[in-house]
Image (cartoon, coloured by chain):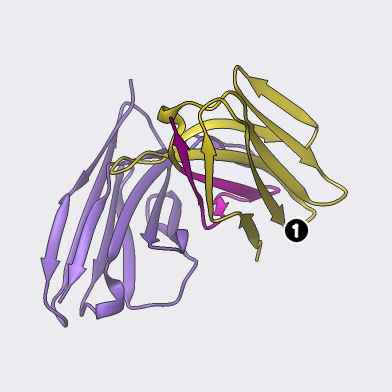
Amino acid sequence: GENVEQHPSTLSVQEGDSAVIKCTYSDSASNYFPWYKQELGKRPQLIIDIRSNVGEKKDQRIAVTLNKTAKHFSLHITETQPEDSAVYFCASLYYSGYALNFGKGTSLLVTP
Amino acid sequence: SQTIHQWPATLVQPVGSPLSLECTVEGTSNPNLYWYRQAAGRGLQLLFYSVGIGQISSEVPQNLSASRPQDRQFILSSKKLLLSDSGFYLCAWSVSLAGGTGELFFGEGSRLTVL
């Protein structure tokens, strides 16, 4: 089955700096790549996603890039704020599949 | 609007006891339904998913089982819990799309501690 690797597992940045989280996937037939944010004690929520026919997508301070050839995708957060502190999960979906495969998560800490 | 309810929120059970976690979705029909387990350092592990009543796909062999007795009801069960079953269990739903799934909406989770 699909294997999604995510790194780093922990990331600490100062407020205002950028943060980048990277994921790689194994199955070239995967075509949907969402990112979820889970704040402490809360449920994961979708923050941005990208499909395989797009190379980059932006939403205010967050962006996702996809390199299909290399089979990796990344989350970029600019001008980080303390409220960005959370665990971020990447995921991939196999073409015509029904269930997302998640990475192990990155714990992001933004210090004032 | 759609909502998802999951209960109980916390559960402490002895080894060997049974388990039943329940999840219901409101405001939508024929959703895809999922059970994930979240353990420290292991991310979100898919346990079961269902694309329709009575249709269950298992991703991880274990002593857990799932059932979907009604369109918007998903139940996670075990006859005899193991210590390794401890974790945070998340139910989720998504709109059923041709050729796959869309955004997952998670419940608030059930924290299970097996002693």
Left or right of B5 in this view: A24:
right
Chain whose colour in the figure is yellow: A
The percent position of residue A77, horizontal first and vertical second, equals 60, 30
In magenta stretch: residue A97: yes
Left or right of B30 in this view: A53:
right
Q: What is the quadrant of residue B76 in the picture?
A: bottom left
Which residue bears the numbered disc 1?
A27
Instruction: Please name the predominant secondary structure of the magenta segment in the image.
Output: strand
Q: Amino acid at mark 1?
A: Asp
Q: Which residues are magenta?
A: A87-112
The answer to which of B5 and A103 lies nearer the viewer is: A103
Left or right of B33 in this view: A22:
right
Q: Quadrant of the C terminus of chain A?
A: top left
Q: Chain letter of disc 1?
A: A
Chain whose colour in the figure is purple: B
Q: What is the quadrant of residue B84 in the picture?
A: bottom left
Give the residue at x 59% y 48%: A91
For label 1, the crowd category at 10 Å Cα-Cα, with few meaning under 14, some 14 to 19 and many 20 or more, is some
